[in-house]
Amino acid sequence: MKIFFVSHCLLNSAAVVRQGGQKTALKQRFLENTLRLGIQLIQLPCPEFALYGHLRWGHTKEQFLTPAFMRQCKKIASYAAQQAAEYQRFPEQFDILGFVGMDGSPTCGVSVTCSGFSGGEFLPDTSLPKAEKVQGRGVLSDILAEMLPIPLYSLEQAVELLESGRF
């Protein structure tokens, strides 16, 4: 049995800061392929939603590099590592394919994250620098990479691999 760990928002768009059109077609292709191939999905909790709830605004990776947020991500990664270790005890039955994250996320981006503004006040006469998409992993993805000996894929990469028959 093949297994993917997945970013929370891959299965639950309601947890995303800005809803609507959040890679919906790509998510559908991913889910159709995993269902067709019988691949199991383990949804990780969303540290952003857990700490800041639904009414939060968008953040960048730099803004999430706080002790509390990192502790929450380590807790989630530890939970995933415990599950992975149990499945890996039975290699003849289970094959953990990796973690699938959402590129652009400051938390679960795998090859692209959100970087930029790192603090201050919103004042009418202040010109705040804009956040931008940059190469790199999000906070949770960085911690998962350290704690789990499994590959990390963006949603785009996972769909490409699934559709090419490499899983």
Image (tube, grey):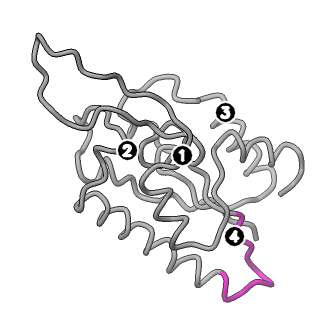
Q: Which residues are magenta?
A: 88-97
The residue beneath circle 3 is 26
CA gap, disc 1 to disc 3? 21 Å
Residue at figure coordinates x 46%, y 40% from the top left: 105
Tags 1 and 2 in contact by the CB under 8 Å rule? Answer: yes
The residue beneath circle 1 is 136
Q: Which mark is residue 96?
A: 4
Residue at figure coordinates x 73%, y 51% from the top left: 34
CA gap, disc 1 to disc 2? 10 Å
The amino acid type found where label 3 is placed reads Leu
Q: For the residue carrying disc 2, how many other residues have a C-alpha within 10 Å: few (<14), some (14-19), or many (20+)?
A: many
Query: Which comes before the other along the chain, label 1 or label 3?
Result: 3
Query: Which comes before the other along the chain, label 4 or label 2?
Result: 2
Q: Check disc 1 and report its element: helix, strand or loop.
A: loop
Query: Which comes before the other along the chain, label 3 or label 4?
Result: 3
Q: Nearer the viewer, residue 110 or 91?
A: 110
